[in-house]
Amino acid sequence: MKPQVEIYDTTLRDGSQGEGINFSVADKLRIAEKLDSFGVHYIEGGWPGSNPKDIEFFAQAKKRKFKNAKLAAFGSTRKKNTPVEQDDQVRLLIEAETPVVTIYGKTSLLHVKEVLRASPDENLAMIGDTIRYLKDHGKFVIYDAEHSFDGYSDEPDYALATWQAAEKAGSFDVDKVREAVIGEKFKGPAGEVTMQENHHLVNNVYIGETLPSGQFKIIKTFAAVAAEPFSEKFLK
């Protein structure tokens, strides 16, 4: 029997970054309540370390009772050369008082060196320290492996090491998650999609033309086109 698929909604964070979108705290609370009524399992409320609005949202949200959803605060691993218990951003994640905390960490060795300006071992420590510290404070931790496929494509051994650092700290079992999603089918806006063994989706592809109204007219449909990531034929 395959495991139940759980829905993790990022409307209140990723959705708020769209052009022309500017949610108020009241907007975010109303959206969270509506998502809860839909039966969504996890609602990512925002990044309390990034702006006062998200801090206020979590202060208000903890006074509400959600029937189906668990609220998640989003953030990053601790900073390099900073003990996790002294990291202000991690402190704010705990002070948000959500049952779930989602943190992202670097998978790509290139990003570790060029963006974080950290050593590979320091990045692994940043991942493990942060997850362990949050779990010690009673949080259910979800680890977001940033740029995981690109990182794995460039340096597979190091990418795996970052996931193992998260797993050893108690976040999740990478192999079981990757195995479980293969063959899963999801209802998307254009119909049903299927997860392949390469962890990309089989989806319909459309060719269309733009109408004066700004809408699209579908001219041709290619059904169930399988993704071919990193295919050599696209590099020729």
Image (spheres, rainbow, N blue to C red):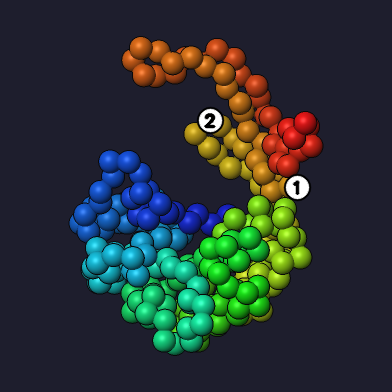
Does 124 appear above or below 31? below
| Mark 2 residue crowding within 10 angstroms, few (<14) / some (14–19) / many (20+) | few
Label 1: few (<14), some or many (≥20) within 10 Å?
A: few
State the residue position of label 2: 190
CA gap between label 2 and label 1 equals 21 Å
Q: Is residue 139 left or right of residue 98?
A: right
Q: Quadrant of residue 120?
A: bottom right
110 or 217, which lies in front? 110
What's under tag 1, amino acid-wise? Glu
Along the viewing direction, whichever of 88 and 219 lies nearer the viewer = 88
Could you tell me which quadrant the N terminus lies in?
bottom right
The C terminus lies in quadrant: top right
- 165 on left or right of 16: right
Say what secondary structure mark 2 lies in: loop
**Can residue 1 be seen here?**
no
> What type is the residue that disc 2 sits on?
Ala
Q: Residue at (69%, 64%) from the top-left corner?
A: 159
The residue depicted at 28 percent of the width and 41 percent of the height is: 20
Residue 35 left/right relative to 191 = left
Q: What residue is at 53 percent from the left and 68 percent from the top?
A: 116
Q: Nearer the viewer, residue 164 or 188?
A: 164
Give coordinates of residue 95: x percent, y percent: 33, 79
Query: x and y percent of residue 67 in the render?
Result: 36, 63
| Residue assigned mark 1 | 197
